[in-house]
Amino acid sequence: MRETTAPVMTAAGELRAIVHCPDAAGPLPGVVLVDGGGDSTAEGWAEQTAAFAGCGAVVLTHDKPGCGGSPGDWRDQTLAGRARDSLAALEVLRRQPGVDPVRVGFLGISQGGWVSYLAASQAPRAVRQVVAISGPGVSAADQERYRIACAVNDDEEALAWVDERARRLLAGEDPASVAARQRTYAGQSWYELACGHYTPEMLPFFARIGGFDPASVLPGVQCPVFAAFGGADTSVPVSRSVAVLSELLPSDPRHALAVFLDADHGLMPVTSDETASYAARLAPGFLTMLTHWFATR
């Protein structure tokens, strides 16, 4: 596989990007990998890049703002800002040797699914296809509530605070006052599970993205979508997500939806061998499906 660098110009500045081109006759479809929450660098996808490229696509990975030496800070972004970055990366990928400029799209993981749907709705003529792995069909606030509920075994006090925190942040309350109130629960057994991720630095980020609901953009997604979920996912409400996608995506016989019953949020069976390669640990059949998807899009 050949790797070349190709910077992506965004509002934050020039983001580092790497284009991964399989050793196969082209032109091939191209996908921009869109990561979930947290830090992410162009090289941080590790074995995932080779696994996805091995399915017959040229893959572009890039830094999030503030990661890997790139300027900016992703924590200052909205999901709309992330979508704009992803569309800028898509245009870079479209111009690369070996890429069919018509057959380009996104492969979004977790939060990256929201970003991919949003970007596709904003630029329907530019995006040919979307693959979403564990991309929630519910709002950011609902997804987090589900994740935390699974972690704390539906503890009523914990979830009461989760609901209050979301309500106050989405109403525009100063995150510092929310953080102060949150610290009063520091002695509770559920505190780390429900609040550990919600540091004073991250509360403003949640305030910016918590109100996003994919229901508002799914009807505008004009390209075919392949959505894959793990039935044992404790971060995303899978049945609700499947129902929303089935109802709100425009009717298109090219859509594909798969639920791998024993797989987790990373689309890996919960009993998989952690010493095996990424490709070997993925739910059986997924990479075969992805290969067919790329070949027919």
Image (tube, rainbow, N blue to C red):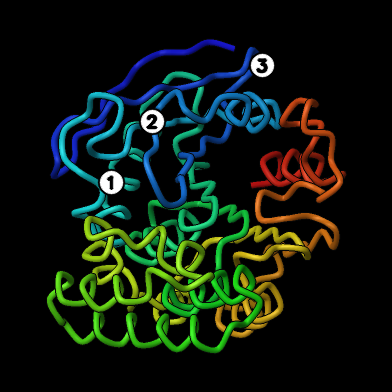
Residue 67, percent across and down?
29, 32
Pointer 1 local density, CA inside 10 Å: few below 14, some 14–19, many at least 20: many
Residue occupied by mark 1: 85
63 shown above or below 173: above
- Near-viewer residue (257 or 67): 67
Disc 2 is placed on an element classified as loop
Tell me which amino acid carries mark 2.
Answer: Thr
Residue in the image at 62% along x and 82% along y: 154
Pointer 3 local density, CA inside 10 Å: few below 14, some 14–19, many at least 20: few
Residue in the image at 20% along x and 43% along y: 73
Q: CA distance from mark 2 to mark 1?
A: 14 Å
Residue occupied by mark 2: 41
Residue occupied by mark 3: 24
Pointer 2 local density, CA inside 10 Å: few below 14, some 14–19, many at least 20: many
Q: CA distance from mark 1 to mark 3?
A: 28 Å
Tell me which amino acid carries mark 1.
Answer: Asp
The answer to whether 218 appears left or right of 202 in the picture is right
Tell me which amino acid carries mark 3.
Answer: Ala
Residue in the image at 72% along x and 31% along y: 278
